[in-house]
Image (cartoon, grey):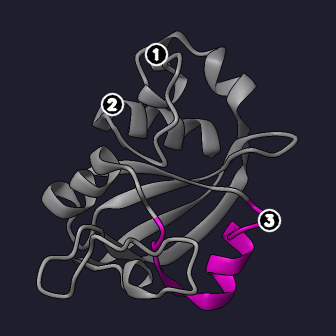
Amino acid sequence: MRYWLIKSEPDAYSIDDLARDKTTPWTGVRNYQARNFMRDQMKPGDQAFFYHSNCDEPAIVGIAEVSKAAYPDATQFDRNSKYFDDKATTDNPRWLHVDFRFVRKTPPLTLTELRRHKALAKMRLLAKGNRLSITPVDPAEWQYIIGLLK
């Protein structure tokens, strides 16, 4: 099993939305590295921290699980979607996504609080310039954060 951190702006799709929907396709990712994580490494059963970004208090707010392996993101073919890609074809899709299942909400664990812990100093989320919407989480970091959330 692998561990991940997935980011979403709460006004676009929040942990409450995932709790309501139970599962969701993680569409609209348009970064090749994040796409490659989904395509090559994410498998059903993998766990992910759900992180609210670009808000007053960015924070881990829940846990989700990969429920379906990577498959073509239909938004790339929809001319009315902001994620439309005119270079993508059904025979050669450029963008993939996985589905996530809601596991549970957690107390907010803010970015400020995460930065206070030396054990998390190498976490990709905390790296300068990191803007990826999907990042791997080291198993030791996962366990440490789970301990903080209890």
| Circle 3 Cα neighbour tier, 10 Å, few/some/many (<14 / 14–19 / ≥20) | few
For the point 22% across and 82% down, which residue is it?
89
Measured as percent of width and height from the top left, residue 31 is found at 38, 50
For the N terminus, the image quarter is bottom left
Q: Name the residue under label 1.
A: 119
Q: Residue 140 carries which label?
A: 2
Query: What segment carries the magenta color?
Result: 10-28
Camera-side residue of 70 and 119? 70
Q: Do the residues labelled 2 and 1 touch (CB within 8 Å)?
A: yes
Q: Can residue 15 be seen in this view?
A: yes
Camera-side residue of 64 and 144? 64
User: Seen in the image, is 132 located left or right of residue 105?
Assistant: left
For the point 49% across and 48% down, which residue is it?
133
* Residue 45 sits above or below residue 22 on the image: above
N-terminal label among 3 and 1: 3
Q: Mark 3 points at which residue?
A: 11
Measured as percent of width and height from the top left, residue 57 is found at 82, 39
